[in-house]
Image: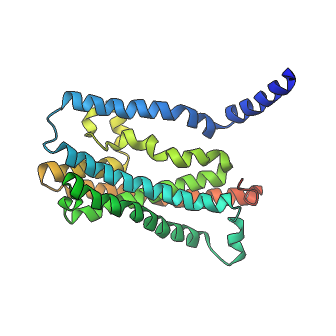
Amino acid sequence: MKFNRIYGLFLRHFFLITRSFPRILDLIYWPSIQITLWGFISNFFAIHSTYYNNAVGVILTCAILYDFLFRTSIGFNMLFLEEIWSRNFTNLFIAPIKISEIIISLVFTALIRALIGLIPAILLTSPLFGISLLDLGIHLFFLFFSLYIFGVTLGIFVSSGLLRFGPSFENIAWSTMFLLAPFGCIYYPIEILPEFFQKIAYSLPLVYIFEEARNILINQSVDFQNIIQALYLNLIYLIIGIFSFYYSFEKARKKGTLINIGE
């Protein structure tokens, strides 16, 4: 057993990690996000233990909404990653296909993937827990639509990162939603966040979506301002995401890394 060989192999992996920002971020955010998210949840229930009259219903409804968002984002990422893993992405351009057509096809396929996972979850909550998402009424459509647009937008941003940085960005595909979860105020109102975090949260459509879901379930009222604000922010992020995808694609094409993308 030679020390030089062990040291050489150690250096290989050490430099691979330390010279890659996505890999460093992957090591840091998991414990940080878990502690932050559940810390806020614990603080909320410790201070406002009587906030929810129907805690199970509210929490399960928010959990289902969040799961739909998560599956939409991951679904988009998975479809794009499968093209990369199979080294098939560049082969798509043998046909006269446009970037816009690729994005649109992934958007609709991601919706099908999300619905396949969502529908059984909705059907189970009623007989097992006596909870029905239909309690949200017609406004349920707008909440799901906003979550769908934001999930797709996150998928576009992650796909842009994969084009720009290559396989090292793959871990971000699995972690984007967990990174944003503390600021989305999924299980607690925004008031529980520190003031600085509240400013970040208000820049995301998630906080308006989940605040409105709780408002409908708890107060039996609808604040259309939350729904409109969520759709407005979604539109902005979606436009930025699409431009980011086009920019990353052009950069990868000009640098010649597009043909080598994959594992």
Q: Residue furthest toward the top?
A: 3
What is the quadrant of the N terminus in the image? top right
**x and y percentages locating residue 125 in the rendered image:** 26, 55
23 or 238, nearer to the observer: 23
Q: Is residue 230 left or right of residue 21?
A: left
Q: Is residue 133 left or right of residue 65?
A: left
Q: Is residue 232 left or right of residue 216?
A: right
| Residue at the image position 74 percent from the left and 32 percent from the top | 15
Q: Is any part of residue 241 visible from this angle?
A: no
**x and y percentages locating residue 209 in the rendered image:** 29, 52
Does residue 134 lie above or below 203 as drawn? below
| Residue at the image position 71 percent from the left and 66 percent from the top | 90
**x and y percentages locating residue 229 in the rendered image:** 30, 55
| Residue at the image position 77 percent from the left and 28 percent from the top | 11
Q: Is residue 34 left or right of residue 134?
A: right
The image quadrant that residue 9 belongs to is top right
Q: Is any part of residue 129 visible from this angle?
A: yes
**x and y percentages locating residue 135 in the rendered image:** 18, 59
Q: Residue furthest toward the bottom?
A: 96
188 or 98, nearer to the observer: 188
Mark count? 0
Q: How are the residues colored?
A: rainbow
| Residue at the image position 53 percent from the left and 54 percent from the top | 157
Does residue 155 lie above or below 3 as drawn? below
